[in-house]
Image (cartoon, rainbow, N blue to C red):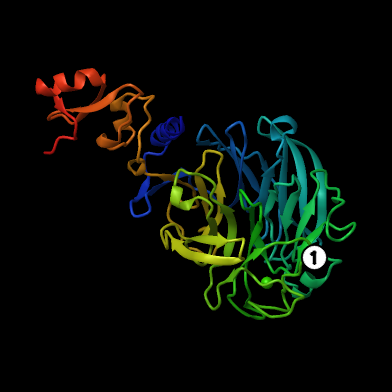
Amino acid sequence: MKYYVVFSIFLLGFMSFASAQEFPELGVKVETVAENLKVPWAIAFSPDGRIFFTERGGELRVIENWKLNPTPITNLNVGGGEGGLLGVELDPNFEENHYLYLYYSYNDFLSTFNKVVRYTENNNQLSDEKILVDKIPGAAIHDGGRLKFGPDGKLYITTGDASNAGLSQDLNSLAGKILRINSDGSIPEDNPFSDSPIFSYGHRNPQGIDWHPESEVFVSTEHGPSGERGFAHDEVNVIQAGKNYGWPEVVGDQTSPDFVNPIIHTGSDTWAPSGAGFYDSEKISDWNGKYFVATLRGNHLRMIDLDLQNNQVISSVALFSGEFGRLRDASMGPDGNLYLLTSNRDGRGSPLSNDDRILRIVPIMSQMKIGDSSFSPKAQMKMGIDPHMVLCKEGYELIFKDRVWSPACVKPSTVETLIERGWGSKHVPSH
Ligand SMILES: [Ca+2]
């Protein structure tokens, strides 16, 4: 039934997104799910099929039945320059409790802070606001902002150094950290520092987190310096509880046991990595298990093959270079497709007339190799299966009508007779 699932999603995609851009060399096409957006920042998929996303200017928006609802769910009064409304996440038990979590920056007199807030969402309306974490130091830049539930059911939060690098090493400050809390805002008893939401520290501006789908190894992206202590050196880190990732003492690698080195850094190259996630699907089988990073300045989707057992990188390649401009997030949907958010209207890009966009990467159907015998031979071919790869139900054999290339499944006892009568052959007819 595997290909049945692929087929229905294909039909849905075909009906909804007629204008897909094909990349035959990758075996994928990229569809526009929503357009004319303003700096979408994070995306969250509801089990009921809705897609929630934030726009940095303060709007939480929703896509229902593949249509963008023109009315935002909320429009928050946000502050903080390149901060604003950043992360959105749904509770692992969203179907029951309807909890929706947001991370946003706000101004308080002359200061900027960030906070994590939980709401109850019903029929695209928010209620029961509960502040889970407040007074995370903020600034015009370096506000972190990614929210994601880990496989342990805890909510992880990335925070930036708020343009004050020293705070990243200060365990009394929430800046430059990855935080871990319970879904009600309380501090888990097994956190590495007692009575503290801090999970790891020494970060500059981490904005992408995800866990390997099988090993559950925790991997994060982080923006490297842009002048204050060197340049570039963007990082991908394997995150462990209580560890120090070096900023601002360390840029790139070092040898001290006090700090953890990134599994990969970009040296003198700049990606400006933001959202990231593991691809966990057989749909594009070459991509399964690889780590995808949305890069802003890099203008590409970075695909990294990580050997997490040996803490090394097998390969790291740029996909779609320059095709979509700046990318803010890369996130797996429950449909097994990878979604991208562009960030071309953030003041640092060159927007196209329909930017910003939410994009969806789906396999090109002709990439499918083998059919599904629960469909008729003709239906399998319509799904993109090559005629000679059509599958017949058990007890039937595949033959081909001459001249019309049409495969048919017949009883083996009739095959010889049909061929003798010139009706067809056992092989795909040649032109
Ligand atoms: Ca580091």
Q: Is residue 218 above or below residue 404?
A: below
For the image, the number of numbered tags is: 1
Quadrant of ligand 1: it is bottom right
Q: In the rendering, at what x and y percent does residue 84 appear?
A: 68, 56
Q: Is residue 254 above or below residue 81?
A: below
Q: In the rendering, at what x and y percent does residue 329 appear?
A: 56, 54
Comparing 7 with 96, the one in front is 7
Can you identify the residue that label 1 sits on?
110
Q: In the rendering, at what x and y percent does residue 78 appear?
A: 71, 53
Q: Is residue 299 above or below residue 98?
A: below
Identify the image quadrant of residue 236: bottom right
Which image quarter holds the C terminus?
top left
Name the residue located 14 percent from the left edge and 19 percent from the top edge.
417
Question: In the image, what residue type sits under mark 1?
Answer: Leu
The answer, for residue 77, to whether it is visible in the render is no
Name the residue located 51 percent from the left edge and 47 percent from the top edge.
338
